[in-house]
Amino acid sequence: MTIVENLDKVRGQIPSYVRLIAVTKKKSVTVIKEAYNYGIRDFAESRIQEALLKQEQLQDYPDICWHFIGHVQTNKAKKVLENFHWIHSVDSLKLAEYLDKLASKTSIFPHVCLQVKLLPDPNKYGWEVIELWQDLSNLESLKHLKIEGLMTILPLGLSKAECLDTFEKAKELAAKITEKSSLQLKELSMGMSNDYLLAVEKGATMIRLGTIIFGERE
Ligand SMILES: *Cc1c(COP(=O)(O)O)cnc(C)c1O
């Protein structure tokens, strides 16, 4: 299957309001252009150095919307802010506060998702639900971040029912935070190649797809 065929297949499976974000980590600029020519405008990277090299080669594609989905180290935060429209992987109050400070200095106001862990997963960054509630009032005070949604990555090895249940919990959490705070969490960034149909069923507004579009990463 070609990239175009893969994209066609996925687009045919999901409603038009779902934003299909093409995850191009470890993939070349050539494949990015292929997806772009198909009509994709949302691209995601998880490592800043790799992303900057590609962005430099894609200066003739100014309408790409860049999404950062990797863990943001403090010393890379400024580069992430300057070169990405969305940061899906804001995973701690400390990082959020630091980005807010940088945003106020640079007058770049990024769209942000808060990364949450709905199930314990030692291999993943992100807030546990209880901690997120504890940090909420501090997050509400960060006026330079456009905090617009939740992002979640499921642990490996869940059954279909467990996936659905966990995505449902993400949706309910976003709704509850929106109800109880000044944050408006209308975006749900959830769903990857192996679980995006389940995520969409539970209200994902953004799906992040790599393998199913571009094939396995080296
Ligand atoms: C790599 C990655 C993806 C894409 O994963 P696939 O399984 O290849 O679709 C999505 N989200 C995040 C945060 C990633 O790091």
Image (tube, rainbow, N blue to C red):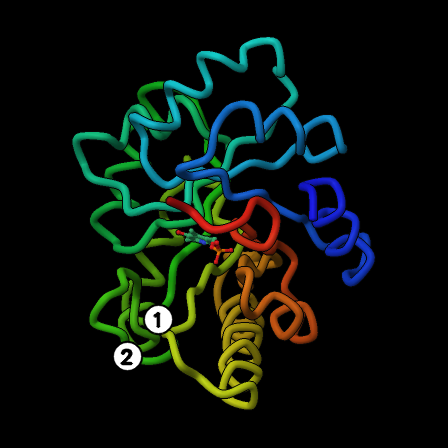
Quadrant hosting residue 106: top left
At numbered mark 2, what does the secondary structure look like: helix, strand or loop? loop
Q: Residues within 10 Å of mark 1 (few under 14, many from 20)?
A: many
- In-front residue for pair 75/20: 20
Label 2 amino acid? Pro
Residue density around tag 2, few if under 14, some if 14–19, many if 20 or more, within 10 Å:
few
Q: Amino acid at mark 1?
A: Lys
Residue 99: where, in percent of width, then height? 30, 36
The residue lying at 70 percent from left, 50 percent from top is 6
Where in the figure is residue 164, as x and y percent of width and height?
57, 83
| Label 1 secondary element | strand
Residue in front for this viewpoint, 25 or 115: 25
Q: Is residue 125 above or below residue 171?
A: above
* Identity of the residue drawn at 61% across and 36% down: 42
* Residue under numbered circle 2: 120
Q: Which residue is mark 1?
A: 117
Residue 145: horizontal and vertical position, in percent? 43, 40
**As drawn, which residue projects farthest toward the left?**
75
Q: Quadrant of ligand 1?
A: bottom left
* The disc label shown at residue 133, or none: none
Residue 214 relative to residue 129: left or right: right
Give the vertical position of 58 relative to 160 (above or below).
above
Q: Along the horizontal axis of the image, is 103 left or right of 122?
A: right
Q: Residue at x 65, y 21 (%)?
A: 63
Kindly tell me whether mark 1's CB lies below 8 Å from ligand 1: no
Q: Position of residue 117 (x, y in %)?
A: 35, 71
| Number of dots carrying numbers | 2
Q: Which residue ends up furthest to the top in the rendered image?
A: 60
Front one among 188 and 43: 43
Distance between mark 1 and mark 2 Cα atoms: 6 Å
* Residue name at image x 28 percent, y 79 percent: 120
**Residue contact between numbered discs 1 and 2, judged by CB atoms under 8 Å:** yes
